[in-house]
Each structure stands twice: as C-alpha cells, then as structure tokens.
Amino acid sequence: MSDEALITAFLKHQADFEQLRRMATADKKLLRVDAYRTDPRDLASAGVSPQRVAEYRRLLHRVGCPEGLMAFPARPGIRFLSSSRGLLNRGSSKGYCYLESVPPLVVINIDKYRPEHPRAYEVYRQIERSWYLFLEHGD
C-alpha cells in the first residue's frame, strides 16, 4: 500500500490507533497480537484476558492492520503491521509505528526511498507527532 493510502487510513482511524497505543502501553507483557496468535501464548502470564485480545483484533481489523501489532522491549516503539512479505529477516513489513523519540532514518516518501547499498534497512516517514509510517526490509 502506498504512503498516501496509509496516511489517509491513519487519519480516518486515528482515534482507533490511539486506543490501540494506549492498550499496548498498558499491557506491557503482551508483545504481539495478530489475527491468529499472541506472544506470549499464555494470556494469563501477560495479564491479559481473551476479551482484551478480541478487542485488539477488532480494532486491528478496523484500522487495516491484519498482520497485527508488535511491542518488543528490544525495539523501541509499537508497530502496527499493514502488510508483510517473505520470511523473517529476508522479507519486508510496512505499516505504522508509534515512537517516543525520532527514529534514525526519516525520509519524505518511503515509496521513493532507495538505499545506497542493498542490505537490511528500516526507514520512517513522519505522519504527525510521534506517529510514523515505517518500512522494514531484510537482506
């Protein structure tokens, strides 16, 4: 999906994105939610109810992020995945990211970005305040 289409969707569903951000911030032990799984699998260990996960899934579907959200402590921010291709470090993911600090590589347009050297990279485009689009590309 293009940057412009993602930004339009974000602005249309901004209240839902903010609700998801608040939920993920409160549920610190819940690292990932998508349509089929959670990390951790044992919701009780994350202090999250099945009803809470159902609410995540409902909101993720509404905002157009079928690949779910991730909030891993080793990586700053909360990522909302609108698309992904390939496997793990050899694939790519694009979506939204909430970051409290400015990421290292911010560009005007992700769709037009071309890295100098073909290798793994992450690139961001600011939407507003702490909200960004991101593209993560593996080797």
Image (tube, rainbow, N blue to C red):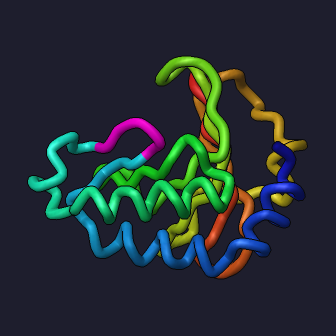
Residue drawn at the location 43% of the way across and 64% of the way down: 55
**Left or right: where 45 falls relative to 53:** left
So how many labels did they put on this image?
0
The dominant secondary structure in magenta is loop
Q: Nearer the viewer, residue 135 or 70?
A: 70
Residue 117: quadrant of the picture: top right
Residue drawn at the location 60% of the way across and 19% of the way down: 86
**Left or right: where 137 falls relative to 58:** right
| Segment tinted magenta in the rendering | 34-38
Q: Is residue 115 above or below residue 27?
A: above
Residue drawn at the location 86% of the way across and 55% of the way down: 5
Q: Is residue 36 magenta?
A: yes
Residue drawn at the location 47% of the way across and 54% of the way down: 57
Q: Is residue 41 magenta?
A: no
Give the x, y percent position of residue 91: 59, 23
Residue most toward the left?
45
**Quarter the N terminus occupies:** top right
Residue 90: quadrant of the picture: top right
Give the x, y percent position of residue 121: 61, 36
Give the x, y percent position of residue 71: 37, 55
Give the x, y percent position of residue 102: 57, 69
